[in-house]
Amino acid sequence: MEPGREYMQEKTAPPSLNTHSSEVDEMTFQAIKTSVTKFVKDEDGLTVVEYAVAGGLISLVLVLAFTQLGLTVCAVINGITTALGGAAAACAAP
């Protein structure tokens, strides 16, 4: 039999590929733990998210306020037009 071909006869991986070092597993676990801890403690990303949420809420309030303002202005103009004897325009929310 050729040297190095013994594992093919047994249909298993060579010993060097079959063993897992607990030291390597511990290093991987430690690296993952360190990355997660750094991500949780990082406040820069949280600040960006807070600004995005605040910007979205402000935009929503502005859209609603201007929509209501437009409807109110339309109603006032219709009141004036009707008082002068004209036909009222249709005021509909977009």
Image: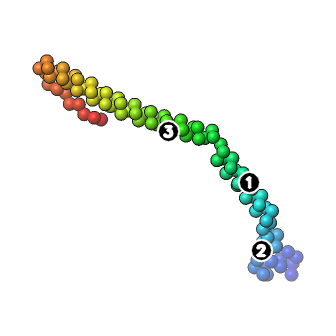
Q: What is the secondary structure assignment of the residue under circle 1?
A: helix
Mark 3–mark 1 distance (CA, rounded to whole Å): 32 Å
Mark 2–mark 1 distance (CA, rounded to whole Å): 28 Å
Q: What is the secondary structure assignment of the residue under circle 3?
A: helix
* Residue at figure coordinates x 83%, y 77% from the top left: 5
| Picture quadrant where residue 59 is located | top left
Q: x, y (%) of residue 10?
A: 78, 81
Mark 2 or 3: in front is 3
- In the rendered view, would you say 73 is above or below 15? above
Q: How crowded is mark 3: few (under 14 residues within 10 Å), some or many (20 or more)?
A: few
Give amino acid for label 3: Val
Q: What is the secondary structure assignment of the residue under circle 2?
A: loop
Quadrant in the picture for the C terminus: top left
Q: Are marks 3 and 1 in contact (CB under 8 Å)?
A: no
Q: How many marks?
A: 3
Q: Name the residue under label 2.
A: 13
| Picture quadrant where residue 50 is located | top right
Q: Mark 3 points at which residue?
A: 53
In this rendering, position of residue 82 left or right of residue 13:
left
* Residue at figure coordinates x 65%, y 47% from the top left: 39
Q: Name the residue under label 1.
A: 31
Mark 2 or 1: in front is 1
Task: Tell me, for residue 87, which label it has, or none.
Answer: none
Mark 2–mark 3 distance (CA, rounded to whole Å): 53 Å
Q: x, y (%) of residue 9?
A: 79, 81
* Residue at figure coordinates x 80%, y 73% from the top left: 14
Q: x, y (%) of residue 28?
A: 74, 58
In this rendering, position of residue 4 left or right of residue 67:
right
Q: Are marks 2 and 1 in contact (CB under 8 Å)?
A: no
